[in-house]
Image (tube, rainbow, N blue to C red):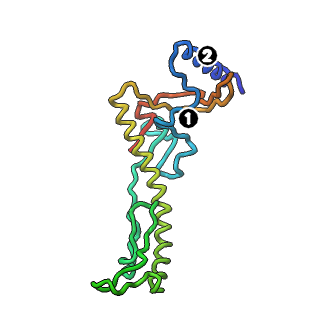
Amino acid sequence: MNQQLQTRAESLFDYLQEIIKLGLKTIRTVDEHQDDFLLFQHELPDSDDISLYTTSEDNLIWLSVHRQNIPEPPKLPKDIQHWVTVFSDPDREPQIIEQQVKDENGNHTVGFCDDESCQDAFSEYLEQWEKWAKEARIKKRIQVFFDKLFKINEQLKYDEQLELIWGHGLLLCKYGEYTIKYPLITQECRDKSILASW
């Protein structure tokens, strides 16, 4: 550990000791923020719609997230439209209707598996759907993340007690009976030049 990091680590311990003296709740690990909002950089979806450390009009933007437009799933072929239910959620696979009644009296039923052409058509469709779902799942994750950031940004406008903190580096060690897992450097994010989402 170089001298600068050692100094910061010692300062963190001094801070924790002072907090204990004041009788305030001590946060020793970032995991204790899990009920609020906690995200590690490696958890960000891998996408061009999320950028780190970019510039705009000579301002450094630490994080930018683009609002997502999740496309609709591919359309079913006519032959199997009445046999398959498709959802706009990429995490819900198409559902086959196994049997259908062919007359009004309910005396005659037909099964999906009885028609090989339907099975072939569904197999071909499923390939298209899986390709769509792979892309749509990424967009869905990004949109969920965007919605969280948007909500936080709105809360920050009206709640002066609320803070959004960006941490750099991570100190992980044992201190007496406690485990310390906390960023060495923290920065409050209220300025649009630090955090931007659109």
Q: Is residue 68 above or below residue 112?
A: above
Q: Is residue 174 above or below residue 87?
A: above
Left or right: 20 in relation to 70: right
Label 1 sits on residue = 31
Where is residue 119? Give x, y as percent: 48, 81
Question: Callout 2: helix, strand or loop?
Answer: helix
Residue at 38% in and 64% down: 72
- Total marks shown come to 2
Q: Is residue 16 above or below residue 148?
A: above
**Residue type for callout 2:** Asp
Residue at 43% in and 77% down: 98
Residue at 66% in and 23% down: 4
Q: Quadrant of residue 10?
A: top right
Furthest residue toward right: 1
Please name whichever residue, 184 or 120, is drawn nearer the observer in this view of the structure. 120
Q: Neighbour class for label 2 at 10 Å: few (<14), some, many (≥20)?
A: few
Q: Quadrant of residue 79?
A: bottom left
Label 2 sits on residue = 14
Q: Earlier in the sequence, mark 2 or mark 1?
A: 2
Q: Quadrant of residue 162?
A: top left
Mark 2 in CB contact with mark 1 (< 8 angstroms): no
Where is residue 187? Give x, y as percent: 50, 28
Which quarter of the image is occupied by the N terminus?
A: top right
Question: Callout 1: helix, strand or loop?
Answer: helix
Residue at 71% in and 25% down: 2
Left or right: 23 in relation to 88: right
Give me the C-alpha separation between circle 2 and circle 1.
21 Å
Where is residue 108? Give x, y as percent: 35, 87
Which quarter of the image is occupied by the C terminus?
A: top left
Where is residue 116? Give x, y as percent: 48, 86
Q: Neighbour class for label 1 at 10 Å: few (<14), some, many (≥20)?
A: some
Please name whichever residue, 123 or 85, is drawn nearer the observer in this view of the structure. 85
